[in-house]
Image: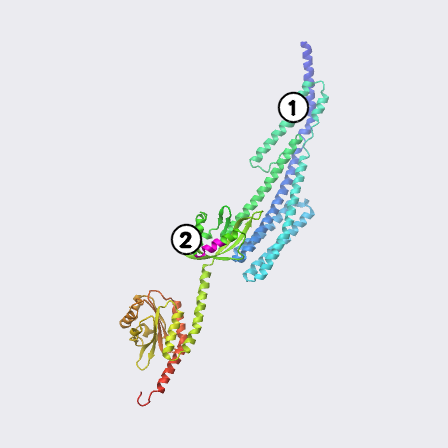
Amino acid sequence: MPRLRSVRARIIVTFSLLMLLLVGISLIPVFFRPQTAQVNVDADAVKKASATAAALADIDTELTLQLEVLRIFPVTKDWSFADTYRSSVARVEASVQEAKDLQGDSADPQTLATLDDITRRANSIGLAGDAVFVFTDVSDTEQATETSSRIEGEVAELRPMVADLISEQQRQMDVALASTAGGGGGGAGLPLWALLGSAGLVLVVGVWLALALSRSILRPLAALQADAHSIARGETTTMAHISGPTEFESLAKNLNRMIVALLAKETAETGVSESETRYRQLAERMADLVFRVDIQKGLTYANPVWEKVTGFTLEDLASGPEIVGRLVHPEHWQSFIALCKGMLSGNMPEGPLALKCLRKDGQTIWLTFSFVPTYHEDGRLAAIEGIARDTTMLSHLVKEVRQRDDQLRLFISLSNAVATAIGFEEATDRALEAVLELLPRAEAGFLMAYNRHRDLLELHAVRGLDQKIMSKLVVKPGENLIGKAFETGEPDLYSSIKELTAPAGLGPESGNLLKQAAAESGLPQSIMCAPLGIGERPFGCLVLVAFSEGSFQTSDLDLLQAAAAQVALPLENAQLRAETDLKAITDGLTGL
C-alpha cells in the first residue's frame, strides 16, 4: 500500500503538473492577449469625443453671453461691453478650431462641413454685434434693434447645429465604450474543457477549478476595485479594464460611462463657473446697480455699486426685509408695496420704474428700476433680477427745467404787464411785483427812479417793507450799494451782514431806514441790486431783499439783471410819457 500510494501520488502529481501546464499554456492567450492597447485606443476616442463636446458646449455658453451683452449695452452704453463681446466672439472661433483639431483627418465630412458653417455664422454674429454697438452709439435705435433681432435669429439657428454635434460626440463615446467591452471574455470555456480532459482526476480538477475561479472572479474583481479607488481619488482619466464574466463586463462598462459623465460634468461645470465668473465681473464693472432677489431666500446678489450709491453695505442689504424700510422713501412706500404685490401676482412693470429712495445718511435719491422675472417650470415666480440706475441728477435737472419753464412764462409776461400799465407809478408797481414773483427767494423789494432835477434816486414802488418809512429813502448817484449800481450800470450781490455794513454797503442812513422798514420781518441780510436803463445812462435801480444770509445765488443775480433789462424799455417809455404829460400842463413862463 505505501508503495501503491507512492506511485499513485507520483501519477497524481505528474498528471496534475501536466494538467496545470496544459491549462497554463491554454490560458496564455487569454491573460496575455493585448487588451490594454484596445482599452487605451478606446479611451483616447472617448477623451477626444468628450473634449469635442466640451468645446461645443463652450460655444453655446459664449452665445448666451453675447446675447446678454447685447441686451445690457443699449441700457448702459458702456463700451467695455464691446470688448467683452469681441472677446466672446474670439473664444467661439477658438472653440470651433479646437473641435476641428480634435476631429483630425479622420473626421466625418459632414461634421467638418457643419463646423465650417458654425464658423461662418459665428463670424457673421460677431460683425453684426459690432454694428449694434455702432448703431446704439449714434442713437440709431431702429437699426440697433433690427440687427439685435437678426443676431437672436442666427443664434437660434446655430444652437441646434451645436446640439446635434454634441449628440454625435456622445454617440461616438457610446460606440467607443461598446468596442472596449467587446474583447473581454475569451476564456469562459476553459474550465469545462479541463473538466472533460480530467474526468478521472476529481481532486486535480477541483484544484484547477479553484485556481480558475480565483483567476476569473477574484482577479477581475480586484482590478475593478483598484479602478474604483482611482476614480474615487479623482483620476477621471483612468478607464476600467473590461474582463471576466458578463456581470463584470457590464460593471466595468458602467464605470466607464460614469467616468465619461464625470468628464462631461466637470467640463460643463467649468464652463458654467467661467460664465458665472464673467457675468459677475461684468455686473461688478457696470455703473448700474445689479441685483437678484430669490422669492424664498431674499436678496442673493447685489454688486458693489449699491454701497457707492446708497451708502448701505452689501451686508446691510442682505440683513433682512427691514432694510427695505430704510431704503425706500416714506412718500413712495405705499407705491412700493403695491409694486411688490403686483409682481408676486404676475403683473410685471412694462418699463423702467422710478422710485424715491433714501441713502444711509438720510439724503434723498432717485433710482430707476428695470425688472426681469424668472419662473419655475410650473409657472410660479422663482426670482426677480434687474438693474437700477441712479437718476437723482436727472430728476434734479427735470425739476430745474420745469422751474425754468415757469420762470420763462413769467419772464414773457413781465414786459406785457408793465407795458399795459397806466402811468409811471402803476408801471413801477407792476414791474416790482412781477420780478418778486419771478424770484421767489426774494422776500421784499423796492424800485427807485432817478430825478434829474434833484440829482437823486427816489422811491417809486415797494413790497414787503413799510412804505411810509421807505418813502424817506433817497440815494445820491455813487452813494452806497444802490447809488454805485446806478452809477456803474453793473448789478451787484451782497450775501451777508458783514458786506451790507461795510463802507461800500448800505451806509448808516439807508441801513437804518431798511432796518426800521423791515422791523416785523427781521434784519435784511442779503440784497441784490440791478440798474434800470437802456444805453449808457440808467434811469433807476431795482433792489431785492432777503432776511437770511446767503439767500441769493449768482444765477439769481443773472435772472434779476435779465428781468431789469426786460422791464427797462416799458418803464422808460412810461416815465417819458409822464414827463410829457407834465410839460403839457405846465406854464412855460411861470413853471406852474
Residue 104: percent from left, percent from top = 66, 45
Tell me the quarter of the picture where residue 85 sits.
bottom right
Q: How is the image coloured?
A: rainbow
- Residue reaching furthest to the bottom: 589
Q: Is 430 or 334 nearer to us in this picture?
A: 334
Q: Secondary structure at mark 1?
A: helix
Labelled disc at residue 211: 1
Amino acid type, mark 1: Leu
* Residue under numbered circle 2: 360
| First to last magenta residue range | 331-338
Position of 525 with respect to 336 (left or right) is left
Q: Is residue 538 visible?
A: no
Was residue 44 drawn as part of the magenta stretch in this picture?
Answer: no
> Can you tell which quarter of the image residue 224 is in?
top right
Q: Quadrant of the N terminus?
A: top right
Q: Give the dominant element type of the magenta stretch: helix, strand or loop.
A: helix
Of residues 255 and 316, the one nearer the viewer is: 316
Question: Which residue is rendered at x = 64% and y = 40% of the image?
Answer: 46
- Quarter of the image for residue 136 reads bottom right
As drawn, is 304 to the left or to the right of 168? left
How far is disc 2 from disc 1 in space, using C-alphas?
81 Å
Mark sitting on residue 4:
none
Q: Residues within 10 Å of mark 1 (few under 14, many from 20)?
A: some
Q: Is residue 315 visible?
A: yes
Closer to the chain start, of discs 2 and 1, is 1
**In front of the other: label 2 or label 1?**
2
Q: Is residue 130 left or right of residue 336?
A: right
